[in-house]
């Protein structure tokens, strides 16, 4: 209760305004505005893995509806991704790992629900879904989180395509993914503790090669890389 009241007191210092008018005034004055979305692309009510979605639009275009701004006001779009894949609750998850590797990623990444403590489902990075997300969101640059979780793996897998029920191989995100089989490309791990690094120049060659591989597959630059949970463990690439 004490923390609740402290939170109320903190919020009371901010004036209540008509946000759409305030945002447009700031835009007209030349200010930049950073909008942060909640949840993820695959939970979007229209473009996600229906019916395992939320009730709103979580893609970039949802910011226009939520803030009262036109699409012509949107500039750079930063797509935030993990170095691996997770999902909360039910729904299709082609790269989900049910073995020791999945448990290891979960433990190292502290992938447990903040409120319930429930285990999150973990798997290898899914480039098919990422390409789809980049497309529908209009992502211009990527931010990769939790790369340090994979620091000690001998090899890293990335899903580059799906094998459909009829045997067809596709790199595009299909309408149904319940029965797809992930096609992996395996890359060498970097086997280096990067949590103390302060520059991308310190990255081991295997990690640089991994980043280059992801950028080539996704056709989108990775601008920021997180190598730990603290703010200081954030590398902004040149």
Image (cartoon, rainbow, N blue to C red):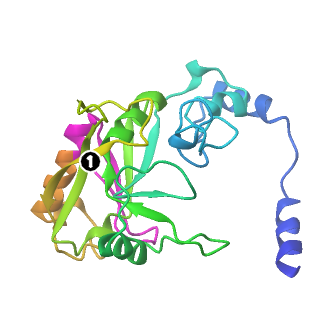
Packing grade of label 1 (10 A; few <14, some 14-19, many >=20) is many
- Residue sitting at x 17%, y 46%: 213
Magenta residues, start to end: 214-238
- Residue sitting at x 22%, y 75%: 152
Above-or-below relation of 6 to 204 = below
Q: Quadrant of the N terminus?
A: bottom right
- Residue sitting at x 22%, y 57%: 157
Query: Which of 51 and 172 lies nearest the eye of the viewer?
Result: 51
Above-or-below relation of 18 to 7 = above
Badge count: 1
100 on left or right of 14? left
Query: Which of 182 and 213 lies nearest the eye of the viewer?
Result: 182
Point out the residue furthest to the front here. Answer: 166
Above-or-below relation of 36 to 139 = below
Q: Which residue is mark 1?
A: 159
183 on left or right of 17? left
> Percent position (x, y) of residue 183?
22, 45
């Amino acid at each position: 209760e004490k923390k609740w009241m402290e939170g109320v007191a903190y919020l009371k210092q901010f004036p209540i305004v008509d946000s759409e008018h305030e945002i447009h005034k700031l835009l007209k004055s030349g200010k930049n505005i950073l909008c942060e979305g909640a949840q993820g692309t695959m939970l979007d009510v229209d473009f996600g893995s229906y019916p395992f979605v939320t009730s709103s639009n979580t893609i970039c275009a949802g910011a226009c509806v939520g803030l009262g701004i036109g699409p012509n006001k949107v500039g750079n779009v930063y797509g935030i991704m993990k170095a691996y894949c997770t999902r909360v609750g039910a729904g299709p998850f082609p790269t989900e790992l049910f073995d020791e590797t999945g448990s290891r990623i979960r433990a190292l990444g502290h992938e447990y629900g903040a409120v319930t403590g429930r285990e999150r489902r973990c798997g290898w990075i899914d480039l098919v879904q990422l390409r789809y997300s980049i497309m529908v969101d209009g992502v211009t640059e990527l931010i990769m989180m939790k790369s340090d979780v994979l620091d000690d793996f001998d090899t890293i897998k990335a899903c580059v395509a799906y094998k459909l029920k009829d045997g067809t191989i596709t790199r595009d995100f299909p309408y149904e993914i319940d029965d797809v089989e992930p096609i992996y490309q395996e890359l060498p791990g970097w086997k280096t503790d990067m949590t103390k690094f302060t520059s991308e120049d310190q990255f081991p060659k295997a990690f640089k090669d991994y980043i280059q591989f992801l950028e080539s597959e996704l056709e989108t630059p990775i601008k920021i890389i997180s190598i730990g949970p603290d703010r200081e463990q954030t590398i902004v690439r040149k």
